[in-house]
Amino acid sequence: MSAKPAPAGPRPLPPVADAVDRVLADIDARLDWLLALTPLGIDALWARFEASGYRDLPPLRYASPPAGLERMRARLLALPVARIESPLLEAVLAGKQLEVERMLELVRLRGSDGFMAASVELFGGVEAGLLALARDILDQVAPGEPLEADTGVDAVVAAVEDEVSWYRAQAPDFALEVVVDADTGSLMMVSHGRLYLDARLRLPHARLQPLVQHELGTHVLTRYNGLRQPLRQMAVGLAGYEPQQEGLAVLAEYFAGYLPGERLRVLAARVVAAGMALAGERIPAIFGRLHEEHGFSTTDAFDIAVRARRGGGLTKDAVYLRGLQDLLAHLRGGGAFAPLFAGKFALAQLPVIGRLAAAGWVVPPALLPRYACADGFPQALERCRGLAACELHHPRPAPHSLQEPPT
């Protein structure tokens, strides 16, 4: 029997699948789990920790969790997943239903003994091979030349606005809400399509475009492309999408012209810190290992340690290096690059994405990142296909961090 031809264009989801997809997206939008796990008052925590001689600090504090967690859970579990018309769509949406349930559990267990187990179920632990790679990076990769943090939040906002204008010239509906806040818990962070910037943010100018490409050229762009898919979960993220997202985001920094050795070392340190948190180590011990043994500054070591202990031990930070390692393996094997921007999904789901595309439920990305339209990008991508994770860094900034696309 011959295979059915692929649909000519996007195909609407069947009714039950569409209803389940819509509710899953709505629950995800209401459950801002990352903000719920972001500690408050980081500056005061640091001051207390520093005054104690790096030995002690008070418990981490958080904002109130999103209201109605139990109602969200009841609504989630009542979804008629078993009645979805397509077995393919049923498998995809059932996987997402399970992931959202785990997210709800993560927030509910914040600060409790059960939090770490919930984190491992959602993001995985720290496997031996990943920890070995992290240690190799910390042993072999030099930090790179220090650069002055001469760029503040106003310049970052201006660069973001320029980036949005570039995308809007191709797609008039492209938009981004920017929130400048003094207590974000992170210098730059995208959550549910908003870009959060720390009001006191300062960074070297050479890192401006790489970080803009990390946030906009990956997280914002894949969400934009995902919103144009028949399947809404391509914007929200299919189950297990995080490693690929973060791997693409780190790779964007490399393509934008400056991924310093120190940045790669930070990703490795996050793996080490996550492993220590899983072993029950607290912030002072994690801080001491990173600062005294691996040479991180006191502020960087503190930031990494706090991130690893968020909520009671959050293993999400291990996915950056894992995702980068897996993405480089994909590219070394000749894997395609542009289709990875169709939305948010895991590398392992590429065969599923292919089947969804054949059925008309996934279409090619509407936009590609700005750096992928720059002169020399095809050559840079080919070079990247031959690099191992330990080699993916620059000793110094490139003369031009991001070139304009050819006309």
Image (cartoon, rainbow, N blue to C red):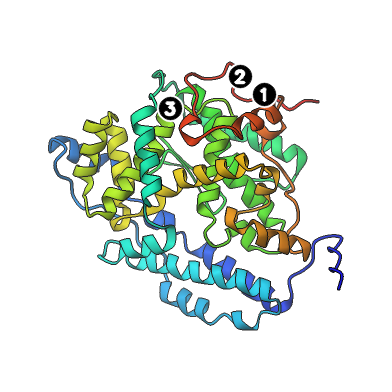
| Residue nearer the viewer, 156 or 329 | 329
| Residue nearer the viewer, 143 or 30 | 143
Which residue type carries mark 3? Answer: Gly
Query: What residue appears at the point 59 percent right and 43 percent down from the top-left corner?
Result: 218
Kindly state the secondary structure of the residue where label 1 is placed: loop
Q: Is residue 26 above or below residue 171?
A: below
Q: Quadrant of the N terminus?
A: bottom right
Q: Which residue is mark 3?
A: 261
Q: Are marks 1 and 2 in contact (CB under 8 Å)?
A: yes
Residue count near mark 3 (Cα–Cα under 10 Å), binned few <14, some 14–19, many ≥20: many
**Of the residues tagged 2 and 3, which is closer to the observer?**
3
Q: Which residue is mark 1?
A: 403
Kindly state the secondary structure of the residue where label 3 is placed: helix
Residue count near mark 2 (Cα–Cα under 10 Å), binned few <14, some 14–19, many ≥20: few
Q: Position of residue 292 (x, y in %)?
A: 21, 31
Which residue type carries mark 1? Answer: Gln
Q: Position of residue 297 (x, y in %)?
A: 28, 29
Q: Is 282 positioned to the left or the right of 117 in the image?
A: left
| Residue nearer the viewer, 86 or 29 | 86
Query: What residue appears at the point 56 percent right and 19 percent down from the top-left corner?
Result: 398
First along the sequence among labels 1 and 3? 3
